[in-house]
Amino acid sequence: CLSSIFYALSINKYYKAEVLMVSSLESSSQSSLIGGLFGSSDDLNFTSGKITTEEAEAILTSRRYLENFIIENNLLKVLFPLSWDNQAGKWKEEIEEVPSTLDGYEMLSNSLEISFDKSLVTVELTLHDADNIAVILNNLIKGVNSFIREDSIVDSGKNISFLQKEINKTILSDSKDMLYRLIEQQTQSIMLANTREDFAFRIIDPAMEPIHPAGPNRRLIVIIGSILGFIFSSSFVLLLNFIKISRST
């Protein structure tokens, strides 16, 4: 009956965990200086070496980052627990298709919710796994800090190489002084990235293991299921009675 179906749905619990954080990044002011210095160059290959807050937030939910995070943390079996056989340590044979990294990205992306309140950023994760949800969310933020920090270091290294080539090409002392200052800024960016763990986001309140499920509301579902089951059963009995009366007349 319908009440049994609704009860089966009600035991499929899900949990929520959230991280409260602030951005450690600022908007780069180098772009105007660099643009004025190299704006006429056709082969310009220089970036500021700094990532803005908006870029960091986009990276956090990007396919590139989330797929790497899923692979590095072996999360497919956590994201698709009904398809994974814990005892055998492999995917169940009866499933039609083994979940792919893209499936994992879509699942994790849809399970994330980011909200903003002035300078505060709240990241919320919803999963069926109460034991791992807090660890996954905390690692997600820790991982994006490392991911962005490493990218920033690589970009700054490329910038320094580019600036050194420009120094060798110019004979103007003012331009050389400007280039040396830019190299100094890029070097400082690398030093900062190497010494700051919370490179993009600083966690104010880390995710904690949830004590109670966030849903579904089992009592409400069972009540609604029972009511609908009673209505369905009553309607079915009345229909059979009507057919029986119709045949006897």
Image (cartoon, grey):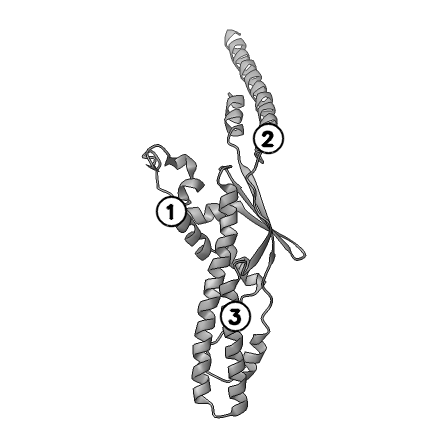
> Marks 2/1: CA distance?
31 Å
Q: From what the image shows, is residue 232 above or below residue 196? A: above
List the residue tagged with mark 2.
217
The tally of labels here is 3
> Marks 2/3: CA distance?
50 Å
Which image quadrant for residue 18? top right
Give the mark nearer the N terminus: 3 vs 1.
1
Which residue is located at x 51 percent, y 42 percent? 133
* Picture coordinates of residue 216, whole percent (x, y): 57, 32
* Picture coordinates of residue 186, whole percent (x, y): 51, 74
* Picture coordinates of residue 213, whole percent (x, y): 56, 34
Q: Is residue 38 visible?
A: no
Q: Which mark is residue 189?
A: 3
51 lies left or right of 76: right
Which residue is located at x 57 percent, y 62 percent? 54
Q: Tell me if mark 2 has few (under 14), some (14-19) or many (20+) residues whose alpha carbon lies within 10 angstroms of its own.
A: few
List the residue tagged with mark 1.
100
Labels 2, 3: front one: 3
* Picture coordinates of residue 94, whole percent (x, y): 33, 33
Q: Secondary structure at mark 3?
A: helix
Q: Tell me if mark 3 has few (under 14), some (14-19) or many (20+) residues whose alpha carbon lies within 10 angstroms of its own.
A: some
Give the mark nearer the N terminus: 2 vs 3.
3
Which image quadrant for residue 75? top left
Give the amino acid at mark 2: Asn
Observer-nearest residue: 182 or 114? 182
Q: From what the image shows, is residue 40 above or below residue 59? A: below
Q: Secondary structure at mark 2?
A: loop
Labels 3, 1: front one: 3
